[in-house]
Image (cartoon, rainbow, N blue to C red):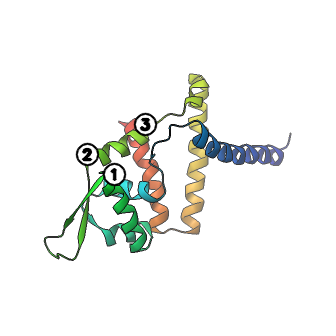
Amino acid sequence: MGKNIKAELVAGKLAEYEQLSKIYDDIVKQPRPRLTVEGQGKVLLVLAEDDHLSQRQIADRLGMSPQSASEFIAKLAKRELVTLSKSPNDKRVNLVHLTAAGRQEVEAAAQEVPPFVNTLSDDDLDELARLMGKVTTAMYADIDAANPTLAVKFHKLFASRYLRQFKS
């Protein structure tokens, strides 16, 4: 079988995995808010790296409108994952702080292992980790070449934050 045909089969399996993982999350996972790399999860991850930011700074780092950031922050505050305080330098500016519960949410999300991964042997896990490392490295290079903005770099932040726990 030629390399192009194999690459097409792998691309098909990746597309299948992407769709199946969405269905899996909807059907199998517990119905609790999970940290993702969207919306509220992005805000939590930014604060986990650099706490006590203004709402404007969070919006700028994530490449989103101040209104969107404000909505996400309000939802996080309602869930008691962040708190707000006035800046000592400018009372018009709200600073956002990650609570202990918010920090725990970030750490717990990084440690979630889907049950289907446990069907793989140790050798399978080693091989999959090696192959996924190659694939994600190439993906990051392509993303950086196409759009090297802070919002894109945020996705790299999530991945490096997750992997940091295994490098020590």
Disc nearer the start of the sequence (3/2): 2
Marks 1 and 3, Cα distance to the nearest angstrom? Answer: 21 Å
Picture quadrant of residue 84: bottom left
Q: Position of residue 20 (x, y in %)?
A: 67, 42
Amino acid at circle 2: Ala
Circle nearer the viewer, 1 or 3: 1
Element type where label 1 sits in the image: loop
Residue, disc 3: 111
**Tag 1 near tag 3, CB within 8 Å:** no
Which numbered tag is attached to residue 100? 2
> Is 52 left or right of 144, judged from the image as shown?
left
Does the image show residue 120? Answer: no
Secondary structure category for the residue under label 2: helix
Among the two numbered marks 1 and 3 on one chain, the one whose residue lies closer to the N terminus: 1
- Of tags 3 and 2, the one toward the viewer is 2
Q: Name, please, the residue furthest toward the right.
A: 1
Q: Residues within 10 Å of mark 2 (few under 14, many from 20)?
A: few
Mark 1 and mark 2: Cα distance apart in space: 12 Å
Q: Who comes first in sequence, dot 1 or dot 2?
A: 1
Quarter of the image where the N terminus is located: top right
